[in-house]
Amino acid sequence: MKTLVPGRSAALRLGVATLIAALAWSLGSATIRAAPSTPPPTQLSLAVTGHADHAPDQMLATLTVESQSPSPAKAQADVNRRMAALLAGARALKGLRATTGSYSVEPTDQKRTRWRAEQTATLTFDAAPDTAAAAPVRKLIGTFQHDGILLDSIGAGLSEAALRQTRSAAIADAVGQMRAEARAAATALGATVGPVTHMQIATRSPIRPMMMMATRAAPSGPQVQAGPISEEINLSATITLSNR
């Protein structure tokens, strides 16, 4: 029988233990490296435009009272008189609101032999310009034109309540488009739609219809035809797409 030397036996046992530990570490490292990593979620950026239409419920008209004279004082006096008559005529119609605008006096030539004075006024009425309710206003404007007052513009508008309603509808349309596009992108990528992490909304000025207007002064009033007013909302958003 062979006798083991104590020193050699301890060294052998230490070597075996070290070999086992190294093998275990190697197997563990391989297992860790083989574990699949989870990719980060996708951030989807979208930009859409929402639309909404609303029938006009306001009438807006801008007029100019103008007078020329060799005397600036006489030109101003004539403008003041005719503007007073315009405001009085507007007050006589229930629901018609008149506000005055810019006032100017300037010579018409370099020698200052003749002067022009003018002042603007804006009329607002709570009905579309082509409705029967606005017929008295159109007739009054025709009278103003017949008296030499210039009609600068006439158009349709929205009241504050109608504007808020139209804007809300345009936002809802934009959000609906955003959700639909996010779902389509998620389906194509095999992902699911997550939370919205960023959103920005920009409001554009309402798109007003072109108005048809008589160019010649007529006591019967200008001829107008209004169309719907469009509101547009630009929406941009960032949405998280989670991996399935």
Image (cartoon, rainbow, N blue to C red):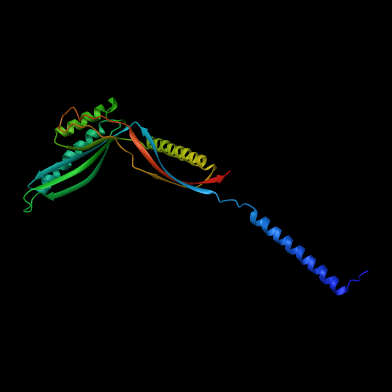
Hey, which residue is sitting farthest front in the picture? 1
What is the tally of numbered marks visible in this picture?
A: 0
Which image quarter is the N terminus in?
Answer: bottom right
Q: Left of 78 or right of it: where is 25?
A: right
Judge left or right: residue 175 versus residue 65. right
- Observer-nearest of 90 and 159: 159
Which residue lies most toward the top here? Answer: 132
Q: Position of residue 239 (x, y in %)?
A: 50, 46
Among the 4 quarters of the image, the one containing residue 135: top left
On screen, residue 165 versus residue 129, left or right, reads right
Q: Position of residue 233 (x, y in %)?
A: 39, 41
Location of the C terminus (image quadrant):
top right
Residue at figure coordinates x 6%, y 50% from the top left? 113
Between 219 and 94, the residue placed more toward the observer is 219
Residue shown at 8% from the left, 51% from the top: 109
| Residue 130 percent location from the top left of the image | 27, 28
Q: Is 40 or 5 nearer to us in this picture? A: 5
Direction from residue 173 to residue 94 in the image, left or right: left
- The answer to which of 229 and 192 lies nearer the viewer is 192
Residue at point 56% right, 45% down? 242
Q: Position of residue 170 (x, y in %)?
A: 41, 37
Determine the residue positioned at 71% across, 61% down.
Answer: 25
